[in-house]
Image (cartoon, helix red, strand yellow):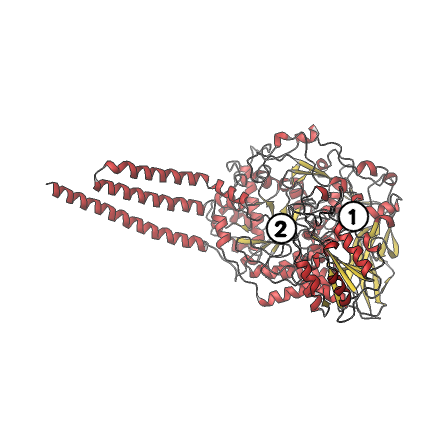
Amino acid sequence: MIDINMSDVISVIESCRWYLIALAVILVIAIITSIVCRKANIVLRGLIRKEAAIVAIAAIAVIANLICFGPMSTLLTLSLGGSGTISAETTEQTNTDVETIAGEGTVLLKNDGGLPLESGKAVNVFGWTGANPVYGGSGAGALNDLYDRVTLVEGLENAGLSVNQDLIDFYGSYDLARGDYGADWTLPEPPVADYDQALLDSAREFSDTALFVIGRIGGEGSDLPTDMSTAPHEENSTEYADFEAGEHYLQLSHTERDVLDMLCTDYENVIVIYDGLSPMEMGFVDEYPQIKAALWCAGPGQTGFNALGEILAGSINPSGKTPDTFVYDLTTTPTFNNIGNFPYDNMDEFMVDKSDPYMGGAVPTFVNYVEGIYAGYRFYETAAAEGAIDYDGVVQYPFGYGLSYTTFEQTLGEPSDNGDGTVSFDVTVTNTGDVAGKDVTEIYYNPPYTDGGIEKASANLIDFAKTDLLDPGDSQTLSFTIDEEDMASYDQSGDGHYVLEAGDYVISLNSDSHTVIDSFIHHVDEDIVYDEGNPRSTDQVAATNRFGFAAGDVTYLSRADHFANMGEALAAPSSMTMSDELKAGFINTSTYQEETDADAAMPTTGANNGMTLADLRGADYDDPQWDALLDQLTIDDMQDMIAHGGFQTAAAPSVGKAGTVDVDGPSALSNNFTGAGSVGFPSAVMIAATWNPDMADAYGSDMGAMADQLGASGWYAPSMNLHRSAFEGRSYEYFSEDGLLSGVMASRAVAGAAEHGVYAYLKHFALNEQETNRWSMLCSWIQEQPLRELYLKPFEMCVKEGGATAVMSSFNYIGNVWAGGCPELLTGVLHDEWGFRGFVDTDYFAGAYYMNADQMIAAGGDTCLSTFDIGTNFVSNVDNPVYVNYMREACHDIMYTVVNSRAYAPENLRTGLETWMKVAIGIDVVIGVLLIGWETLAIRTYLRKRHEAKITIA
């Protein structure tokens, strides 16, 4: 999401330029005419001036109509189309679900007897963030201000805890504030010297327990600083710098460390609450014996701090698990040297015109996915197995890790080979502790690996489940069925196919990615190749190599010889030059070549077949009736649907298609044009941390219900790019570092929204794993295996399991081809392999220098996320039958999704002119009548006065 800003205003004015110039010319002529005619006789002069005024008013009315019904039509429709109201019942239900998710998604990282607190316990809340908590991220996922938020302090008090208000008032009087995201990275924290001794003395009298709250934010448009010494921020003290050169945003600042030292000197019971959106370096919690407990609360949304209070007070038993790996030193992660700003030094001919309001002067940039399939826990587990790292010295909290106030025993049952390529088994979970709680069962597989063969990680999450609330002594048996084909690896050599290699597959029951509870071996007798004659059961056609061009000239990490090339592969880029071969295939608007086909036939347009889109509700995508309907489409209607897909799908009068509204917001729905919005959910990170698919279902269902009540049919969410790096600014919108966990959660959210007729846009398809240079033709270089096994996985699951019918492509390039115009991605994988039926919208259509409708529809995209006329959001040559056929299919895709949404439910169906259009036409009629009346009166007055003048002369 991009808020309407000055760049948008400039673009809109530019689209109206010729209308405004024409109006200015007419007004100037009218003024000149009125001045020049002063030498005429008084009767004629009066008529001329009245005529000039009438012409000027008529011109203003005509040009205003041309602008309103032309380039401003979409903006007016979105701004004046109404917004609907979310019911009190839905709001109450959503707030309840927000608290439930926060209760299950808060992760207990450490507990040496510090939690839970006793009932009614008095606590001191230290840390500026305690008084100014992080509720979520900024940008598309930001919460709005339409609903009251439960503060962290209120959450504690609502749970029966007593909070030292003097400390909260002290932080409220501090003169630094959290800066605007991306522009100011200030981390306000009063230096120890600013604490009055009397305040500290009274705090020790108030409570023997100190809560230290640390906050870190995230958001759209900027990644987190990897060197705070060069990032804009205000220092908390004039005596020292909060960060030295090379220190980053996700480690303690000097001031935070000083405050922690003070607390651990004054208190024996310190509890750390990390209210942050990305994994932080948390090694400090093990350095102080006084830190008795630590929790991760990753942006709990509107009311989620109530759940935090209940966890601290013991009325909720924490059951969250980390959706990411926490390491001691984030600068040693395999991605650290290959995130950020890498501009090409030989691509100046593709430089964005300096007059462009968005990215003027930018050149193409790149990012190398050097780690291959060894991302997140897959790297740490495999590298440890190969002896390449000391696991305990590197990883603090593994993926899938989280503590509880009770204890559990998990027992793996006897596996059963079902003889059909699947294996089944049960896991019995027993609460062996003293309080009720929930536990998560995590199932991993370790495939057979041949040195130098297909790359394989030694730990791969393949399934998981969460128990019900189990009382002490109670058990629950969970059943699992694993499909062999889900353990296949993508072999990118040769033609490329998924392959299940012969050998022993270790299927394990784990408490986290590193800790195995029990396991068994499933043996595969011979290689199984999922090729054209034997595609995977979920594929329409077999996967085959499509993205060889995206590998580029990069050295990728390999497990061969115990990760022998790790130093070379994970180093920072040594060259900023794109090779001539790759450069020759680089495509942007200036180099895109229009397709031609001498045998292509122009499709029928503008036919009168007597059908409307409503007739196709419930029809299959391939129903023959679609051809008759599509024959009725006019070129203008197709252009409008394709060009104006920003926060809407455009109306098409030729087929009776209603316009629909889309709302933004993976955490809180937001209509940027009407100001309407919804209750805010916890971040996607916290939803994933529940490890409970039912929580994702509640999230999607509530979002769908609220969108429906706001009159919106589309929802720009869920976001499911992976947490490649902790420094991704937008990772709070994404679920996890793992594709399967992300895919399960996203699929359930998509299906939940669909229950209310709302189509969710899977985004950002694909490889939007960093915000830096996202608009600057960012070339993402990656091998086909990690692309398919990791980064496309959640999208694939949402299509196949979630029933998705809408997708948002991404800003970045796949290799040297824009993702929104990449046929291998949008047609080859999405439509052909996965069988997707629906439409693909671009991300915000600001970069006309590389986004264009021609390339998009030829690749399998359908509409541009634009609300006004940019130029390249229109198909450039409607005399070319190749592109008119592409236009026809794009509109088919859009209308298939729309007609099967809530928009075409009988109670919601609304066709015909928009209300503002009817009002405008009414005003036009009134103005026309008045002008005709004035013109008639002016002529009559002129004739009468001229006649009177002749009589006087006579």
Q: Earlier in the sequence, mark 2 or mark 1?
A: 2
Residue behind mark 2 = 139
**Which amino acid does the dot numbered 1 rest on?**
Gly
Instruction: Give me the residue at 46% from left, 41% from top.
Output: 16
Report the side of 870 relative to 150 (left or right).
Answer: left
Q: Quadrant of residue 367?
A: top right
**Image position, residue 644 (x, y; %):** 53, 46
Q: Quadrant of the C terminus?
A: top left
Residue farthest to the right, as pictured: 387
Residue behind mark 1 = 376
Instruction: Give me the residue at 56% from left, 51% from top.
Output: 647
**Which amino acid does the dot numbered 2 rest on?**
Gly
Q: Quadrant of residue 24?
A: top left
Image disc number at residue 601: none
**Image position, residue 83 (x, y; %):** 52, 58
Q: How many marks?
A: 2
Q: Determine the secondary structure under disc 2.
A: helix
- Tag nearer the camera, 2 or 1: 2
Q: Determine the secondary structure under disc 1.
A: loop
Q: Residues within 10 Å of mark 1 (few under 14, many from 20)?
A: many
Nearest the eye: 742 or 205: 205
Report the side of 831 relative to 43 (left or right).
Answer: right
Residue 739 against residue 557 in the figure, above or below = below
